[in-house]
Amino acid sequence: MTTFLAGGTGTPKLLAGAADVFPPGGTTVVGNTGDDVELGGLFVSPDLDTVLFLDGGVLDRETWWGIDDDEGTTHEELGAIAERAGLDAGARYLPAARQTAGRDIARWRRFSGVGEFMYIGDRDRAVHLTRTSLLDEGRTLTEATRLLADAFGLDRDLLPMSDDPVATLVHTPDGPMHFQEWWVAEGGAPTVTEVEFRGAETAEPTAAVRSALADPVVVGPSNPVTSLGPMLAMDAVGRALAATPVVVVSPFVGDRVFSGPAATLMAAVGYDPSTAGVAEAYPFADAFVLDEADPTDLGRPVVRTDTTLDTDADSERVARAVREALEAVR
């Protein structure tokens, strides 16, 4: 078995064409939940859902978010109602007292559905409604994720990093905001002074995650701060990674990032926004897969290839490099 740590789109893109190299039945994905939000009463878990929809064969692979060809009737009507009612759109937090009341796992990340600042398609919404209802019935997030995986016919084990709430909060000169507000509602524009993983000090990985982390681990080309940071903020995860073979695929080519806000966020928390900074952020990594054009000398085993992940053929090529790196450090 091999375990992949997933956040954002990097690891799903790596897995998209990797079935011949890492068969789904022989892999586990542990998904970041620091990006999760409760929006209009519905619990949305974006990083879990990207893998769920990818393996379920319905992912919108233009955006790597949501379900392909999903209609947005409800989302559009929410915006129209807000406009007609004269209500401000954008990210609208529920009052502070409501952030920690009721559903425990939703704490510190609750938003009103007025105007709905994140696009959610109609079929996508059905997934969030099912997940929320299962949580309200008393299921854990792990149990709800397993049931959704069964519904989408996944052969791969898909696990949330924890059943405890951890929220990624981006601090700015104007105050803290949830990562989804900063990235989706504000387009990543506000200056970042600090990134906080609220709740991580008491959160624990589940028994299923601890077991998965005993297998060799692959960290895909995800954002080290907000995609992997919430996992690594749980001390037990760092200890587990230090005790097992770990291969990292860099999301950079030297100091050039492939996509997303990784460079901005790494600089904000004190890491050089580069492959060298990624290596510093991951002291547990035993080997790296780097782009053949990346000049970085890491002093650790490196396998080089073209790390572009635009097609399934790209995914297979990078996955073969990952397997080569794993074989070198097992």
Image: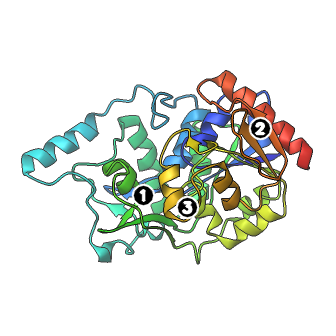
Q: Is residue 97 above or below residue 220?
A: below
* Residue 65, horizontal then vertical, whole percent: 46, 38
Q: Is tag 1's residue or tag 2's residue first in the polypeptide sequence?
A: 2
Count neighbours of disc 2 (C-alpha within 10 A) and say few if under 14, some if 14 to 19, many if 20 or more: few
Q: Which residue is mark 1?
A: 179
Distance from disc 1 to disc 2, alpha carbons, whole Å, reads: 32 Å
Camera-side residue: 292 or 50? 292
What label sits on residue 161 in the rendered view? none
Above or below 229: residue 28: above
Q: Marks 3 and 2, Cα distance to the nearest angstrom?
A: 25 Å
Seen from the viewer's position, the closer of residues 271 and 214 is 271
Q: Is residue 29 left or right of residue 71?
A: right
Say which quarter of the image contains residue 107.
bottom left
Cβ atoms under marks 1 and 2 closer than 8 Å: no
Nearest to the observer: residue 311 or residue 276: 276
- Residue 187 percent coordinates (x, y): 34, 47
Q: Which disc is residue 139 wearing?
A: 3
